[in-house]
Image (tube, rainbow, N blue to C red):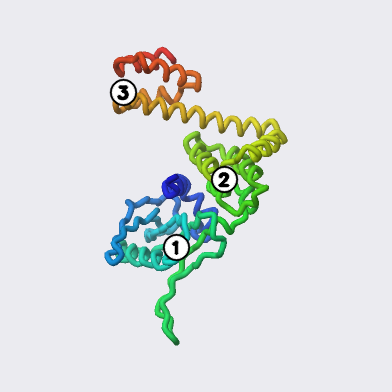
Amino acid sequence: MDHDRLFKELLTSFFVEFVALFLPDVAAYLDPDSLEFLDKEVFTDVTAGDKHVVDLLVKARFRGEDACFLLHVENQASAQSDFPHRMFTYFARLHEKYNLPVYPIVIFSYDTPLRPEPTRYTVAFPGRTVLQFSYVVIQLNRLSWRKFAKRQNPVASALMAKMKIAPRDRPKVRLECMRLLATLKLDPARSQLIGGFIETYLRLNAAELKRYERAFGKLSAKEQEANVEIVNSWVVRGKEELVIRQIRHRFGTLARQVTEHLDKLTSEQLDELGVALFDFKTAADLEAWLTRSH
């Protein structure tokens, strides 16, 4: 599982919501319309012979001003003793390259250990502190999911799956993640991104699934319908992605009108198209089929 990719997709798709959820003080002065996701930065450690890639770097303006700053976000999926030093190294090199203020943030997304992670890097001598560099720490395994269950925020719906959860509460948390997601009314693509997070990090075993289904049965008819609608949208989108991959393999890049037609197909029509593809000789056959389907 590419954990870094999952987290990067989540934060890139919902960066403003991420800041609002965990950094409300920054949200107060961040211009949400100014965000610019910068190309990945690669730093080489000549001494160790390693290369390190910055996970996410965002350039933004202060609200109502022309001045800009950087937000640097690292997702750390494992505990490392030298991590504070690495965060400082990133900060120093980014500050030097861009000559902008850098706001450093780290998300610790591992399950263990549970001990609190350091929030600073210090260089000190007897009687004098030369450097004290600090960064924001979001340590998911020390956050209670209950504090986020009622937050109308897609990042909360996703990251609750990685928070501090008692084993007996796993079915309940998954249900709360889905209930929250249903209230957000996201488009299918972004809804599927959140669903992928929930499925990856809160996958239930057979006994937990039975408890989940019992709890689901106690929801109101409206809530059940909303959840079923979300899951069905994931099924349709999954079929569409599979059909698109098959079409691109056969005929290359798709024309815009073809993609627009595919977006309008029902689940049943996508099934029919998947079978019909075996008989198509050219892209014109595909376009004719799509025209007939409408």
Q: Tag 3: residue type?
A: Arg
Residue 250 is labelled as: 3
Q: Say which residue label 1 marks.
A: 80
What is the count of numbered marks?
3
- Identify the residue shown where x is 65% and y is 32%: 224
Q: Earlier in the sequence, mark 2 or mark 1?
A: 1
The image shows residue 26 at horizontal and vertical percentages of 49, 59
Q: In this view, does 30 lie to the left or right of 178?
A: left
Neighbour class for label 3 at 10 Å: few (<14), some, many (≥20)? some
Q: Tag 2: residue type?
A: Ser
- Identify the residue shown where x is 33% and y is 27%: 248
- Identify the residue shown where x is 37% and y is 51%: 36
Observer-nearest of 99 and 86: 86
Q: Which of marks 3 and 2 is nearer the N terminus?
A: 2
Q: How far apart are marks 2 and 1 (CA)?
A: 27 Å
Q: Can residue 57 be seen in this view?
A: no
Q: Say which residue label 2 marks.
A: 157
The image shows residue 242 at horizontal and vertical percentages of 42, 28
Q: Tag 1: residue type?
A: Gln
